[in-house]
Each structure stands twice: as structure tokens, then as C-alpha cells.
Amino acid sequence: MSTTKNLLVELFVEELPPKALKKLGEAFSAALANSLKNAGLAPATASVTAYASPRRLAAHVTEVAAVAADKPVAQKLMPVAVGLDAAGNATPALLKKLAALGADASVVASLRRENDGKADVLFFDSLAKGATLAEGLQKAIEAALAALPIPKVMTYQLQDGWSSVNFVRPAHGLVALHGSDVVPVAVLGLNAGRETRGHRFEAAVDPVVFGNADEYAAKLATDGAVIASFAERRAEIARQLEAAAAQAGGKPIDDDALLDEVTALVERPNVLIGQFEQEFLAVPQECLILTMKANQKYFPLLDATGKLTNKFLVVSNISPEDASAVIGGNERVVRPRLADAKFFFDQDRKKSLMDRIPGLSKVVYHNKLGTQGERTERVAAIARAIANELCDVELAHKVNEAALLSKTDLLTDMVGEFPELQGIMGRYYALNDGLRPDVADAIEDHYKPRFAGDSLPRNLVGTVVALADKLETLVGMFGIGQIPTGDRDPFALRRHALGVIRMLAESNLNLPIDKLFNCVFAQFNGIEGFQLNINALYDFIYDRLAGNLREQGYTAQEVDAVVSPQPKRLGDIPKRLAAVRAFAALPEAAALAAANKRVSNILKKLPIWPQADIDNALLVEAAEISLYAALSNVVPQADIAFNTGDYTESLQALAALRAPVDAFFDDVMVNAEDPALRANRLGLLAKLHAAMNQIADISKLSA
């Protein structure tokens, strides 16, 4: 039994892609540790610590053995009848098989016999030598490098001038320590040692030499001026950002992706405060924030009200005694960026959004669906139709104006430079043109919700235009066959569908989805090659709805009961779900759900769904007379509650049907020989089915 020690592996490289560094570090350590565990060199309980800095990937694994334990191996040979002759001696076939396994006739007597269900079979039991750490680690490092989620590899020559290797960046050093011992492994043309390089400019010692695996992080920090842990470096940056912001009298912008990227750019962070001229604050703050974040990786500072100040935070990779030169350099670099944003803003305002509308006819939206100009005409027509459904003439004028202008900011210099600002800049330019605030807001908000959890449009004008825009996209793309498959969804149709669902459900607008789609279908008449499978589109919408409701915590049965009938008014969905949940808690629920399922199965088998017409004279059995009487009493109560929007009361009224329904199925033959009796009983079931499924398909609650 070999003694276990902790293991350290570090690959020292040139600067890694910052947006990928966090994943690269996690993937490298996880793959390395898993390989060691699978080889029996580390227990399943071994602790794994990942390190990742701009110039290194490393992993520390505890309890790693020098040699893996031998493993018992059971090798199935052949049936006894084939391997042994009548005298029990080994046949030539058995001897040949044993020789291939490195054994001879001396092991024949110890071969194990076991029945495999067909015949007695010979098994050769042996011990496989456990892998040495050098063997196992070599394979583990190679496997870990091969499994890295590398965005793009590069090919570079090794020092011999002949050989070349492929990796994300040129590698210059390899550390592999088991306790204090170097493990003799090699990868990417590098032999393992105990030395690495620290900070490019501020390392106290070069090279940094490790005495053992456990001093890695501490020695790299003291001798190398590098915080090796991505998580620790990120936390230190966040701490310094807060401290510097407090000193400057503001708060740093909250952006996890930017914090991750900056963490991947520096080895020992030093946060500094810079500033720019007040005059730039006349430019919309979204533009300034975006250019500072995207181009310079700065953290803009906001005041207590969330308004941008003229100060920003720089995360530097050096810590000079006098930081004024670093701060001044960053201030000089950011000034031209801000000046560009101001120039774009000033130039864009010289031309109104209304004057830009003709330009949309020169921008292709989709080669099968025409230009952006044609698209905005469709969106405007859909928005007007929705406003008419809401019987609001003034709204129709506003949504028409907002829809026609909604894409015009795509033609501005600012959005050309920063596509992320589409809609946002449209609102600023609309206000500059003197348009009504709710119309300007709608130009920005018609993209909402842009992502899961995003806010909805802030007013009705924005909601209607957003609905029109998303519905036009869904119908248009489905009509030309651009339907999402698997992970592919290039036109974000799933997000558009969820946006429609959220707006209809959370705004509780009286807009049935079938009427909405009728407003949309008419706008695609005459488009060559346009063929819409309406049922596929409805299924797509309701699948998204079901998934969204399950994420909110509703059970699969509750969601299925409410969504499978495809209710047209999505604003009612929360009330329907609440009603189903309350109904399911009743003692009568299980029996009624089972009965409803039975009724559905009977009626589905019929060539034509029967009318709920009942002739009293043909009600002959006591149980069917009783069921009809119960329905006559319950249905009006349920309908009154349904029509007033009290879905819970409407469903609970059905509880009174349990006894008569049970009696009906116990005592009445539905498929009577007399056609008139049979038709009357099927009509009674159709009436029962309609009453029970007005709010949800309660058969889905049946186990």
C-alpha cells in the first residue's frame, strides 16, 4: 500500500483567452482529477482545487498514491466443454487462449467454473498491476488538455525548430509535484519540473521554485506576485472596486461578465480611479457605459440614483508607488472613445427618425420575407389590429407611429457601432424629435423581454408593439420553414414565444391568442413560398408555456391539465392553475379525474364527436336520470362561477357529480343495442365532458 501525497500540476502558458479562462481552469482541474480517480490513483473523496490566471492553468489534488492498487480481473475464457477434454485436461484451444493472456497450463487447475445461464464457462482470475503515478498522470494530463473547451487552437514550433504542437497558446513550463517529488511526465514538448514564472514585472523571485505541492498558492503569491486562484482574485477585485468606489463617492456598475473577464486579464489586481471631462455626460449614459466596458474593460461609477458620473475604475495589473502615470494613460485612452460616442450622438440627431424610414427599404430583413421596411409595415399593421381588438382608437395611432419608427435607429451611426444599443438609442432620438414619451418608450421597449427575467414593456403602447414584433417574427419564420430544431434557434423564436406568453399572462390583456394570430396571418398574404402550419405554431407556443409553468414550480399534472386544451386567453392561466390545484385537493377529485378519462376515451373512439343533446324521454335507467338531474343542477352553478372568473368555485361545483357519475358507469350500458338509447347516452357523456373540461382537462390528474 503506497503512501498518499498531495499532487500539483501547473501548465505555464502565454496569455490565455480571457473570456474562456474560467471554464478552461475548471475543465482542466476536473478532467485531471477524474482521470486520476478512474485510474485508482486518487480516491473518490479526493479534494480538487482549480487555479487559473492569465498565464497558467493548475490543479491541486489531495490523497494521490504513487502506485494504484492492483485490480482483480475476471477473464471469461470459453465453455468448459471446449476448454477441457473428457479427462479434464486443457485442450489446445484453452492453452492458446491462456498463452495470449500471459499464462500457461499451470493455471488450469485454478480456473473458476461458472454457469452463464447457457453452459458452464471457464474464467481466469488474475490481478492487474496498478498504474504508477507517472503512467497515470501522463495519461491524465493528455486527456485533460484534449478535453479543454478551447475556442480556437494555434500551431506553434517547439525550440528544436522542427516539431510543432497545437494548443490554445504556446506553453513554456510544466510543474508536476507529488509531495516534494517531481513526477517525470512530459507534454507539449515540455518536461515536468518544480519551477514556474511569476508576474511579468513584479515577481520578487524568478523563477519561482516550489519545494512541495502544498506551497503552490502561497509561494506564487509571495515570490511570484500572482494570485493563482481565479475565485480569490475575483473576490479581491470586487473588494477593491467597492473600496475605491466608496473613496470616489459612487458605486461601480454591477456586471458579473465584466468582472470575470477582468479577473482573467490580471494576475495581481490593483484598482485605480480615473475620470473624464464632464461634457461627455451629455451623451446618453448607456453609450458611455458600453464603450468603457466593451472597449476598455473599465468599471463606470454611478451615483446613488444610478446616474453615471465622470469617474471610472481601472483594474491594473501593476502596482507602482506612483500610479499617476497609469491613471493618466488610461484617461488619455478613454477620451477618444468617449469623443467618438459624442460625435455619433451629435451626428445622428441631425436627422429625424421619421426621415430615416425610407432607408429601411434598402436593408434586407430576410431574402424570403423582404426588407426591414416591409417588415415594419407588417408590424405596424399588426399593432393597429391589436389596438382595434382592444377598441382603443388613440392607441392605434400611437402604436402605428411607434412600430413604423421601431427599427429606424438601426440606420444610425451609434447603433452601427454598438448594436447592443438598438431600441435604447431609438428612444433617445425619438424624444429629441419631440415625440410623445409613451411612443418613445415603446421604441425601446418593443425588444422586451430580451432575456429570461427581463422586465416587460413599461406601457400599453410598448406592449402592443412588442407583441406585434414578436408575433410577426414567429409567424414569418414558421411560414418559411425556419423552425427551431434541437439546440438550433438562430432567430431566437423560443425567446420570442416566451415573451408573447409573459406579456399576455402578466399584463392580463383581453387578447385571445387565436385572435392575435388572425391579426398576423393576414399580413403575409401574397408572399411567395409562404406556407404556415398553424397547428405546429400553436404546439410550439404551448410547449414553451408548459415549460415556463413547470419552471415556476407547478407540477407536470397541473400544467398538463391546464395547457393541453390550449386555452386561448393566456391571462387566465394562473387562475386556471389555482383552480386545478384546489380541485385536486378535494376527496372527489381522483374519482372524477378517472371518470373523465374514461368519458374521453369513449368519445374519442367515435367517428364524430356527439352533440350534447339529451331527450328526457330516452332516460330510462335510474342512474342516467340521476346523472342528468345532477348535471342540470351543477352546470348552471359552474357556468355562473366561470363567467364571473371564479374558476376555483366553478371546478369545485363538479364535486357533486362524483356519486351520480360512479353510479352511471356501474349501472348503465352506454353502448346499448337500441341506437336511440345509445345516442342519448353518448350525448349525456358529451354534456358531462363539456362541463368537466371547461377550465382544464381534469383527466390529466388521473394517475
Image (cartoon, rainbow, N blue to C red):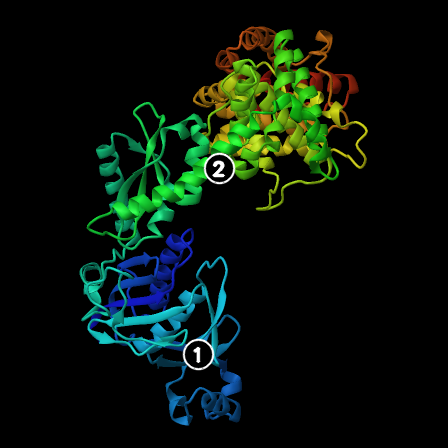
Query: Dot 1: within a 10 Å radius of its alpha carbon, few (fewer than 14), some, or many (20 or more) residues?
Result: few
* Residue 298 placement (x, y as % from top left): 36, 41
Q: Residue at x 65, y 32 (%)?
A: 474
Asked if residue 181 lies left or right of residue 565, the reply is left
The reply to whether residue 660 is visible in this rendering is no
Disc nearest the viewer among 1 and 2? 2
* Residue 69 placement (x, y as % from top left): 29, 75
Q: CA distance from mark 1 to mark 2?
A: 73 Å
Q: Amino acid at mark 2?
A: Asp
Q: Amino acid at mark 1?
A: Gln
Asked if residue 690 lies left or right of residue 160, the reply is right
Residue behind mark 1: 75
Tag 2 secondary structure: helix
Depth check, front residue: 21 or 105: 21
Asked if residue 48 lies left or right of residue 678, the reply is left
Depth check, front residue: 418 or 639: 418
Relative to 5, say whether 584 is above or below. above
Residue behind mark 2: 340
